[in-house]
Amino acid sequence: MTTLRREGLVDVDVVKVAVVGLGVAAQVVYLPLLARRRDVFRVTAVCDLDGGHAEAIGREIGAAAFDDPIATLDAGMSGAFDAVIILTSGSHGPLVRAALDRGLPVLCEKPLAYSLAELKGIPRDARLMVGYMKQYDPAAQRMLDTLHEVGGAMAVRHLDVTVLHPSDESQLLFARVRAAKPAPERVAPYLEADDQALATALGTSSERLRRLYSRVVLGSMCHDLSLMRLFTGSADTVDHAAVWPADAFPPSVEVSGTLRGDGAGRYGLRWHYLPGYPAYHETVAVHHDHGSMELRFPSPYLMNAPTTLTCLSRVGTTERRTVHRDVAEAFERQLVAFHRFVTQGEPPLTGLQGALEDIVTAQRIVRRYAEWAGHPLGGECVEESDSDPTAAEQPAERLSELL
């Protein structure tokens, strides 16, 4: 099918895509779902730094294989594909910028970047969608609609999140993932770029703080930050952050603060890495003047396993409990939204602005923990507040100069 680019849109029914990064997310989630949705997508290129791994997967799905991300993006400029899905590990900032510079619409898995500096100068209207699939979960969307019915974000008294996270290995026992094994010299430049981005963000050589920020807060808790942003907006303040035990990693993390607006709402986030825990559990509860709503998420690697939404309300003298379960897959709904974004220009739930807000909140969490624990910190985490004592609690103002 001929591809016509009109005002940044792709005028086709079936969008040709390249998948860059062929690890767990690609093998367990994206490639199977892209094959399922062949009515709207066709994978025409795959890329991994392990060229043999890319060639094996390319043969299986009938796609061209690359071992260089930039060469892959260059192929898109000549019509090999219409859009790119970036699933590489680490920071995605440089690769996303390279794709956008080539005029390619991008769906990028979280985190978008480790530092704000990596994203400086990217246009506000960049053709960018950031992959927070839980925002597209049918239960989360129903909860958002129900929240609007009771007064919206201003009605929220408290937003409460608890994550019980077993090891990834235990969650993936069923998946039979094939490991990529790129040569160390191929990986080294990307690791160096990540290291520089972390130095820019945190201004510290503390390996524990770097891993806490990159692997825990931006690597996992960011999903909960995205849900908070969907329901109530990004956190207004980060009043408290604790990390324990000192001799374990990943650790447990607890964060609390105030929500935006004049409703005097607060939030609490608790994230526990428990390697031997029986199964992944995540609950997101909202309490308001007229009742409560609670989401219970299963492991993200289980396709079409429904999230449960339970709504508690009162009818006269009766306590009413309503339960909603929908087997529609959140990742699939996200892909369909990406298709609409590419072909119709429908804005994604998270674009550049939302991803930047999450990075700012992540930096404020690490800053608050460092203050609480007495660890030195620098870089973007503190440079704004050093010049303006209120800047640490003003994410919108911090982002204005980047957009």
Image (cartoon, rainbow, N blue to C red):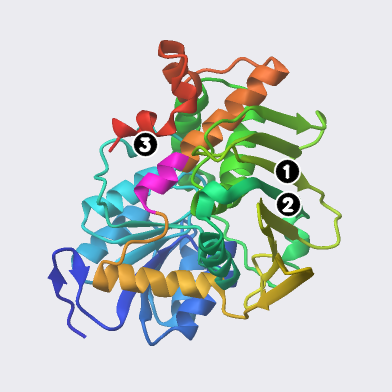
Contact between labelled residues 1 and 2, with CB atoms less than 8 Å apart: yes
User: Between marks 1 and 3, how big is the CA–CA gap?
Assistant: 29 Å
Residue 5: image quadrant is bottom left
Residue 208 higher or lower than 310, as above or below: above
Q: Which residue is mark 3?
A: 118
Q: Which is nearer the N-term, disc 1 or disc 3?
A: 3
User: Between marks 2 and 1, how big is the CA–CA gap?
Assistant: 6 Å
Q: Which is nearer the N-term, disc 3 or disc 2?
A: 3
Give the magenta-colored segment's residue range: 351-357
Q: Which mark is residue 270?
A: 1
Residue 16 higher or lower than 157, as above or below: below
Answer with left or right where residue 318 lies relative to residue 372: right
Answer with left or right where residue 106 lies relative to residue 61: left
Towards the viewer: 233 or 364: 233
Residue 280: horizontal and vertical position, in percent?
76, 60
Would you say residue 168 is visible in this rendering? yes
Q: Main secondary structure of the magenta part?
A: helix
User: Between marks 3 and 2, how big is the CA–CA gap?
Assistant: 29 Å
Residue 394: horizontal and vertical position, in percent?
44, 28
Towards the viewer: 119 or 242: 242
Q: Which residue is mark 2?
A: 163
Residue 121: image quadrant is top left
Answer with left or right where residue 99 lies relative to residue 184: left
Amino acid type, residue under disc 3 in the picture: Glu
